[in-house]
Structure formats: C-alpha cells, structure tokens
Amino acid sequence: MNVFIQRSLFILLTSHIFLLSGGVVAAEPKLIDDFTLGPNSGWVTKEFQGKNTYRPAIEDNIPCLKAESNGTASGLVYMIEYDPSQYPILIWKWKVDDIIEMGDATSKAGDDYAARIYIVFPSFFFWNTKSLNYIWANRLPKGEAIPSTFTSNSMMVAVESGRGNIGKWVEHRRNIYEDFEKYFGSPVPDVSAIAIMTDTDNTGGQASACYGSIHIDSAEKSAAKGH
C-alpha cells in the first residue's frame, strides 16, 4: 500500500478505535510530556517508511526528545481524549537543526518536515476524521495554512518557516479550538490524539530536531499568564 495512504489510514483508524473505546479524559491542565526520562508510556511508535531515531537528550540545558531521520518516516502518537473547548491551548517547544532543502508543502514529493505536531479530531465515521498539522515549514510562509496534498481533512499550518530560527528553541501556543473553527468551519469534536513526527521519506533527505515539553491548558489560565 502506498505509504501516504498508510499514514492517512493510520491516523483515521487509530482515532476511530480510540473514540469507540473511550480513552482517558483530561480533567485539568496537563503536561503531556517533558521528555526528561525519554518518552513516557503513553506514546506509541508508528512506522511509515523506515524508522527514525527518537532518543532522550539535553540541549541548551533543556530536556528533550531528539529526532533523527534519514530518508525515513516514523512518528510517536499519544492517545488522549479531551474537550478542546475546556482546554483549547496547545503549548510546545521545539528546535530544528535545519529545514529540508527539497521540502515543499504544496507538493506530495516535498511533504517532509524537520518537525511537526498533529492534533487529531475523530469522527464516528473515521473517513471524516480531521487533523491540525502544525509544521516547521520549509517554504510555506509562516502564518499560512493549506490543506494537505493528500487529504483536505488535514490542514498544514506553518507556525514556523525557513532558516531564521534554526538552532534556536522556539515555543508556540495555539488555540486549537479556534484553529479548527477557522480552517474547517464546523463544530469542534473532542481531541483523540497528539502526535509528533520528523520525516524525510519523500525527499530522501536528512533532518534532525528536538521536541521539548508539550502541554495542554485552559484559555483562562493561559490568559492569566499573559498569553
């Protein structure tokens, strides 16, 4: 089966199964992981084309998960069900060593990123499952968003782009509830999974990145912090 179809089916099918089985409901603002001891037991590895290396590291005195990809694509998926109207803020930090020279979000052949984080919104009919795909884009300008070249149910949102901040830690705070409404224009379902991935399988290139702490938070608490 085509690897691109495998990716889409994995996210869709996994979300559908998790939706039916219930899952763990987040009752308060939550640290997903800070990778101090490596990925916690909630993460599940999924290989699409070969296997990346994900290992605990410390860079600039910040604990993180170091991802290295060499013509490969594998990700880590964290299954968690929660109401994004209660906890709409996704907070994470990351750092990339470089962008992917041949990467291009507008082309299937260029659909590779040094760093990306997914938020998955399931549907009872799994083919309607949607995702917000926050990317460190190669060419797509920061702030722009386009549908994935493989499915309109996945929006590629360039929260960072190009080489301006390579080698630097960058923190992002996104209101996933507002983003879903903006990009899909439909009622916002519960979240079913968060995933991270560094991938170079389409371009055959190399990439490395560090993923720092990932949190979900309430809008009220984030506003109180000045964000």
Image: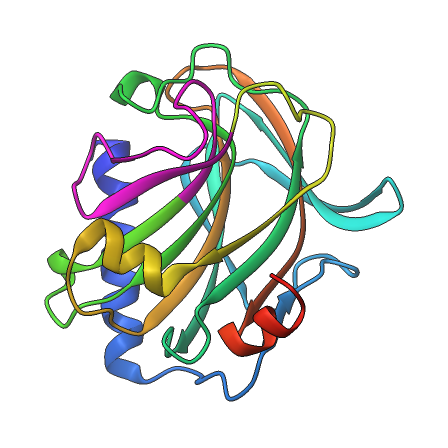
Q: Is residue 50 left or right of residue 172?
A: left
Residue 7 vs 121, above or below: the answer is: above
Q: Is residue 136 left or right of residue 185?
A: right
In the rendered view of the protein, which quadrant contains the C terminus?
A: bottom right
Residue 67: in sight, yes or no?
yes
Please identify the quarter of the rendering in which residue 13 is found.
bottom left
Magenta part of the chain: 134-160
Q: Is residue 186 left or right of residue 167?
A: left
Residue lying at the far bottom of the rendered structure: 27
Tell me, yes or no, whether the highlighted magenta stretch contains residue 162: no
Residue 121 vs 99, above or below: the answer is: below
Give the x, y percent position of residue 46.
Answer: 44, 49
Give the residue displayed 20% in from the left and 34% down from the top.
Answer: 150
Give the x, y percent position of residue 54.
Answer: 64, 43
Residue 11: in sight, yes or no?
no
Please identify the quarter of the rendering in which residue 216 is found.
bottom right
In the rendered view of the protein, which quadrant contains the N terminus?
A: top left
Residue lying at the far right of the rendered structure: 61
Give the x, y percent position of residue 82.
Answer: 40, 78
Q: Nearer the viewer, residue 182 or 5?
A: 182
Please identify the quarter of the rendering in which residue 166 is found.
top right
